[in-house]
Image (tube, rainbow, N blue to C red):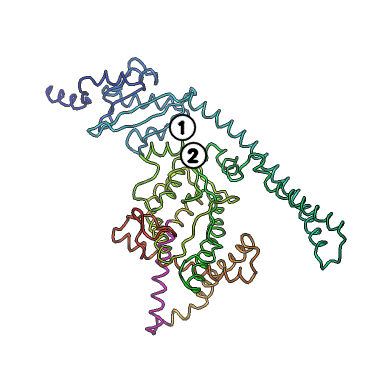
């Protein structure tokens, strides 16, 4: 009986670490604890005991030391929710984070890091980062003050430009009108006076329009670093607008005929309208839901946010991600950072005038959206996502699947109409519903055309705006094609992609995406 009790007691004792481990832990500059695969503490160093202010009779590696240590540390934490989360993770009931900051009731901030230590165990490192956080908070406060001053300077430059531009435009208009021969003959002296007025008014207009740069201000960088963007220390990423630099190119396909050029110009125009109005509107909606997406060009990220994500996820950009920038935005919000969109400025990129390259690019985007479904659980359970942000994110993830379902439903309805019988009667009887759905799907695209013309192409006719709206409606049907292609690629296990070939590239330098 006594032998059995001794064996049971021995089984409860944690395994002893190898020789030299204590000396190695004591040599570390941080507080350190070696934890076994069963989450039991095997050894702690002197800095660990001092930093956590452990009582002399508390041996973390002892029989009941682990539970006593958990209770001691939980009592040090400032907020009840932090205690619950800490205990759940420590006891294996919650998700494990590799890096976390803990706020203590005495005002200290301790940073905990986990590193694999072999045999299923890990090394727990703890350091006091109170001074670093205080320095960072002080720096963030100074950055906010500077951002506020920058905003005031930008606002003053904008007001001055507006106040100068309006009267100068009036002076220019009247001077040009008087110099027009249709207004009647002028004497030489009168003509000289008017030309001097015109010349100086144009000069003042040029000075006014360059007022922000003359003041040493870059409007785009001022907006990105302003109080509503990186001036906020919790802002991890900023996305600005995107426009197509070749939207006015009259001959986008060298060596091709008029019809090919006309089609390519329309395809380029549709991409510009898509990014300029509909995508911008979606991002403005996402600002309200707290789910702004990062995407490719026009993306700015905070370095400390990338470092934190890398510490928690091993790298800020995930391998084999087809929408690596969008996924980076997801990781930022999951880490507690905010992401915003600034629509008042934009970056330019090339639109694709080739159908194959365009469909290749959009198929990658559609497949990337479907792949993001794997984040659903983390987003739904995250305390950093509000309900409306969760709904918008799920809408984005499942949009290609909805396109595919709509395509299949349309095919079924067409087959029913062709075959006839009771199925056809049901489809025909639902024509009012089909009409309502058609109107709700067509009208928004048609309305975007005039909005795009008014904001970005005011020199074009109103008829052009309406025609662009109708073209946007037809252009949107490519989503059904690329969603189907992306889903088929996913089913076939084809997840590798290279970047889309640029317009000027006739032969690829390095790997490029297959155009098919």
In the picture, residue 230 is in which quadrant?
A: top right
Could you tell me residue 356's position as x and y percent?
40, 65
Instruction: Answer with left or right where residue 370 lies relative to residue 135.
Output: left
Quadrant, the C terminus: bottom left
Residue 302: assigned label: 2
Instruction: Answer with left or right where residue 146 lies relative to residue 234.
Output: right
Seen at 54% across and 46% down, the residue is 340
* Magenta span includes 413: yes
Instruction: Check the image and report above or below for 183 versus 226.
Output: below
Could you tell me residue 454's position as x and y percent?
64, 62
Looking at the rendering, the stretch of residues picked out in magenta corresponds to 397-424
Does dot 2 land on a helix, a strand or a loop? loop
Camera-nearest label, 1 or 2: 2
The residue that disc 1 covers is: 80
Q: Nearer the viewer, residue 456 or 208?
A: 208
3D distance between C-alphas at marks 1 and 2: 30 Å
Seen at 15% across and 25% down, the residue is 7
Q: Nearer the viewer, residue 169 or 69?
A: 169
Instruction: Check the image and report above or below for 26 versus 38.
Output: above
């Amino acid at each position: 009986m006594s032998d059995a009790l001794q064996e049971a007691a021995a089984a409860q004792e944690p395994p002893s670490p190898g020789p030299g481990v204590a000396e190695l832990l004591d040599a570390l500059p941080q507080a350190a604890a070696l934890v076994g695969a069963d989450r039991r503490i095997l050894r702690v160093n002197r800095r660990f005991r001092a930093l956590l202010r452990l009582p002399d009779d508390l041996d973390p590696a002892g029989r009941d030391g682990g539970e006593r240590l958990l209770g001691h540390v939980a009592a040090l934490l400032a907020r009840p929710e932090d205690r619950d989360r800490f205990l759940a993770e420590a006891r294996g009931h919650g998700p494990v984070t590799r890096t976390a900051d803990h706020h203590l009731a005495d005002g200290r901030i301790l940073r905990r890091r986990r590193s694999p230590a072999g045999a299923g165990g890990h090394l727990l490192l703890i350091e006091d980062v109170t001074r670093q956080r205080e320095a960072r908070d002080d720096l963030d406060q100074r950055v906010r003050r500077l951002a506020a001053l920058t905003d005031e300077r930008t606002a003053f430059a904008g007001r001055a430009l507006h106040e100068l531009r309006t009267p100068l435009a009036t002076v220019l208009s009247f001077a040009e009108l008087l110099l027009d021969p249709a207004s009647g003959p002028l004497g030489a002296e009168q003509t000289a006076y008017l030309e001097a007025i015109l010349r100086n008014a144009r000069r003042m207009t040029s000075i006014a329009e360059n007022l922000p740069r003359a003041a040493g201000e870059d409007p785009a960088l001022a907006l990105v670093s302003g109080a509503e963007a990186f001036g906020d220390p919790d802002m991890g990423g900023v996305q600005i607008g995107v426009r197509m630099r070749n939207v006015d190119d009259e001959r986008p396909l060298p060596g091709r005929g008029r019809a090919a050029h006309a089609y390519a110009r329309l395809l380029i125009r549709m991409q510009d309208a898509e990014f300029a109005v509909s995508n911008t509107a979606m991002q403005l909606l996402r600002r309200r839901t707290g789910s702004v997406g990062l995407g490719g060009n026009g993306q700015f990220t905070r370095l400390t946010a990338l470092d934190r994500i890398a510490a928690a996820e091993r790298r800020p950009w995930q391998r084999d991600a087809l929408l690596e920038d969008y996924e980076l935005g997801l990781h930022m919000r999951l880490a507690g950072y905010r992401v915003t969109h600034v629509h008042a400025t934009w970056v330019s990129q090339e639109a694709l005038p080739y159908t194959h390259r365009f469909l290749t690019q959009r198929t990658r985007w559609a497949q990337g959206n479907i792949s993001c479904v794997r984040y659903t659980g983390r987003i739904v359970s995250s305390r950093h996502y509000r309900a409306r942000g969760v709904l918008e994110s799920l809408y984005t993830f499942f949009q290609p699947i909805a396109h595919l379902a709509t395509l299949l439903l349309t095919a079924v309805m067409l087959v029913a109409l062709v075959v006839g019988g009771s199925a056809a009667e049901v489809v025909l009887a639902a024509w009012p519903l089909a009409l309502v759905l058609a109107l709700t799907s067509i009208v928004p695209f048609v309305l975007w055309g005039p909005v795009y013309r008014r904001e970005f192409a005011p020199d074009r006719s109103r008829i052009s705006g309406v025609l662009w709206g109708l073209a946007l409606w037809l252009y949107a049907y490519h989503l059904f094609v690329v969603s189907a292609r992306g889903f088929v690629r996913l089913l076939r296990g084809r997840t590798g992609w290279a970047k889309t070939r640029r317009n000027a590239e006739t032969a690829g330098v390095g790997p490029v995406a297959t155009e098919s």
